[in-house]
Amino acid sequence: MTLDTVKRREQIIDLLCHEGSVRVEPLSVRFGVSSVTIRNDLRYLEQKGCALRSYGGAMLNQQFAFDRPLQDKGRMNRDVKSRIAAKAAEYVKDGDTLILDSGSTTTQITPHLKGRRDLVVMTNALNIAYELAGFERIEVMVLGGSVRQNSYSLYGPAAEQQLRQHRFDTLFLGVDGFDLEAGITTPHTGEAHLNRVMCEVAHEIIAVVDSSKFGRKSFCMIREAGQIHRLITDSRIPDNYKRALTELGVEVIIADD
């Protein structure tokens, strides 16, 4: 696959996200390629799960977890995420060692840690590290690596090696897609690798997930749905998810009850 093809398909995904649907002929004119090429692009995106083909074009697959910018994610379901974050902070005690994964919900946990004493917090999120740096009695550790501009997060072999040198009480894991069969997924391969290492070095894994993420799946698996200890979510979690996860031994906590 050429670089031009990759860039064109990424731009088609952006159009799908913003407009909800695309048409073959306008795309052909826009990118200066044949309609056959555009149809091949749409067929590829359908195979990857992010588009649904329609007559003369394609529609956005709402069940696919896209790699949206952090600012956009932060505006979505903000009140719900705030309640989930507040509930998550209740599971932090003075003296704990934590990993805060990048993400819009984990970002909202940060202000609730102000006033806690003798915490050690490691994060791969630049925005979280910046905010935590202003809090007294919290030691902030930042993973090194390559920067993902969409999420202000760091990833890569250096970050993974750094993580493996430590052990933590609790990981607060952000989620792009949560599906009972596909598991916990994310669109970015490098971040998925890092998240898996986070899970390995944490005694307890707490996923913070608003209900819009259920039933969504993406390219890269982080963990099977039953391989977490707690799930903090909102009351719109589907009943079959709540029941299945409870049967798998996951404690399901509803933040807005």
Image (tube, rainbow, N blue to C red):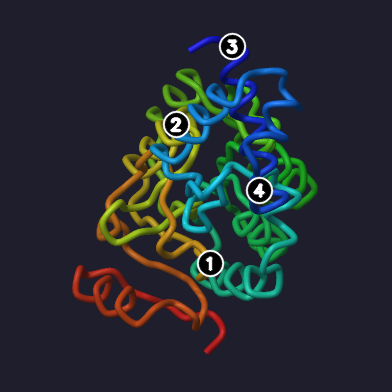
Query: Is disc 2 placed on a helix, strand or loop?
Result: helix
Look at the numbered discs 4 and 1 and tell me whether their residues touch, using CB distance below 8 Å. Answer: no
- Mark 4–mark 2 Cα distance, whole angstroms, equals 16 Å
- Mark 3–mark 2 Cα distance, whole angstroms, equals 15 Å
Whichever of callouts 4 and 1 sits on the residue coming sooner in the sequence is: 4
Look at the numbered discs 3 and 4 and tell me whether their residues touch, using CB distance below 8 Å. Answer: no
Q: Amino acid at mark 3?
A: Leu
Look at the numbered discs 3 and 2 and tell me whether their residues touch, using CB distance below 8 Å. Answer: no
Residue 208 drawn at (x, y percent): 50, 62
Q: Mark 1 — residue?
A: 212
Q: Amino acid at mark 2?
A: Tyr
The furthest residue to the left: 247
Look at the numbered discs 3 and 1 and tell me whether their residues touch, using CB distance below 8 Å. Answer: no
Query: In front: 124, or 24?
Result: 24
Whichever of callouts 4 and 2 sits on the residue coming sooner in the sequence is: 4
- Mark 3–mark 1 Cα distance, whole angstroms, equals 33 Å
- Mark 3–mark 4 Cα distance, whole angstroms, equals 21 Å
Q: Mark 3 — residue?
A: 3
- In this picture, residue 80 sits left or right of residue 98: right
Q: Mark 4 — residue?
A: 17
Q: Is residue 82 visible?
A: yes
Q: Is residue 224 above or below residue 6?
A: below
Q: Is residue 97 visible?
A: no
Q: Mark 2 — residue?
A: 44
Q: Is residue 74 above or below residue 147?
A: below
Q: Residue at x 49, y 44 (%)?
A: 50
Nearest-to-viewer mark from 2 and 1: 2
Whichever of callouts 3 and 1 sits on the residue coming sooner in the sequence is: 3
Crowdedness near tag 3: few (<14), some (14–19) or many (≥20) residues, C-alpha within 10 Å: few
Whichever of callouts 3 and 2 sits on the residue coming sooner in the sequence is: 3
